[in-house]
Amino acid sequence: AQTVTQSQPEMSVQEAETVTLSCTYDTSESDYYLFWYKQPPSRQMILVIRQEAYKQQNATENRFSVNFQKAAKSFSLKISDSQLGDAAMYFCAYRRGGDMRFGAGTRLTVKP
Amino acid sequence: EAGVAQSPRYKIIEKRQSVAFWCNPISGHATLYWYQQILGQGPKLLIQFQNNGVVDDSQLPKDRFSAERLKGVDSTLKIQPAKLEDSAVYLCASSLGQMNTEAFFGQGTRLTVV
């Protein structure tokens, strides 16, 4: 079974600074998708960014970018110019076909 | 476009009682998921439907949990009888299909079993 590991239960960043959240996963497959979801206190899971495993180019979405290292099975999220609204739980997720698995999450605090 | 709708938002029940949650996915989405999210943990898949058929229910505690998706649209998740450890947020998600497209989530139902 595929597993997703987020080794940072909590992270903190100063407003306007940059922070990187880590994620590793375990799979024997070569074709899959990786996602970062944000979950604010409202509980709504919101997609932040996604990466197709067959693409070598790292995905970027405005202030959010990933560092995808397929051989190392690593998928980190970089948030640039952090804003107060970025404070939330962040979940890394792996999906192949219908199977979607999540990590335990990282709680991000943004300090003004 | 309307999102994934779930109800109720909150539910408090006593142990050994039964409870049901409802989910209406985004129109046209064939794949529907139910996840259980215990406080401080990531979502854990309980069951996945493709249209009205079950694709994966390997982590569903079938002695007390049941789910159905009649007509391949709305879905209900039932717990009978509830245990204290069932206290969690139950998230419903849907996607167009199984082929790696993103999943859209509802706001979840927070269940407290006392």
Image (tube, coloured by chain):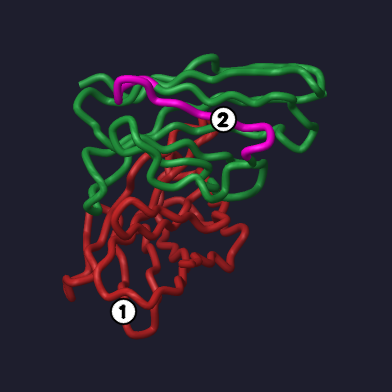
Chain colours: A red, B green
As shown in the figure, which amino acid type bears the numbered disc 1?
Lys
Question: Percent x, y for residue A67?
Answer: 32, 72
Question: Is residue B72 on the magenta stretch?
Answer: yes
Residue at 42% from the left image edge and 59% from the top image edge? A17
Question: Percent x, y for residue A70?
Answer: 31, 79
Callout 2: 10 Å neighbours few (<14), some, many (20+)?
Answer: some
Q: Tags 1 and 2 in contact by the CB under 8 Å rule?
A: no
As shown in the figure, which amino acid type bears the numbered disc 2?
Ser
Residue at 40% from the left image edge and 53% from the top image edge? A100
Callout 1: 10 Å neighbours few (<14), some, many (20+)?
Answer: some
Residue at 26% from the left image edge and 19% from the top image edge? B2
C-alpha separation, residue under disc 1 versus residue under disc 2: 37 Å
Residue at 55% from the left image edge and 56% from the top image edge? A106
- Number of the label disc, if any, that sits on residue A56: none
Q: Which residues are magenta?
A: B62-74
Q: Give the vertical position of B19 relative to B67 (above or below).
A: above
- Nearer the camera: disc 1 or disc 2: 2
Question: Percent x, y for residue B59?
Answer: 57, 49
Residue situated furthest bottom in the rendering: A71
Read off the chain for label 2.
B
Q: Give the vertical position of B87 relative to A59 (above or below).
A: above
Q: Nearer the viewer, residue A106 or A15?
A: A106
Q: Nearer the viewer, residue B50 or B96?
A: B50
- Number of the label disc, if any, that sits on residue A70: 1
Read off the chain for label 1.
A
Residues beneath discs 1 and 2 located on the same chain? no
Q: Nearer the viewer, residue B59 or A64?
A: B59
For disc 2, the marked residue is B66
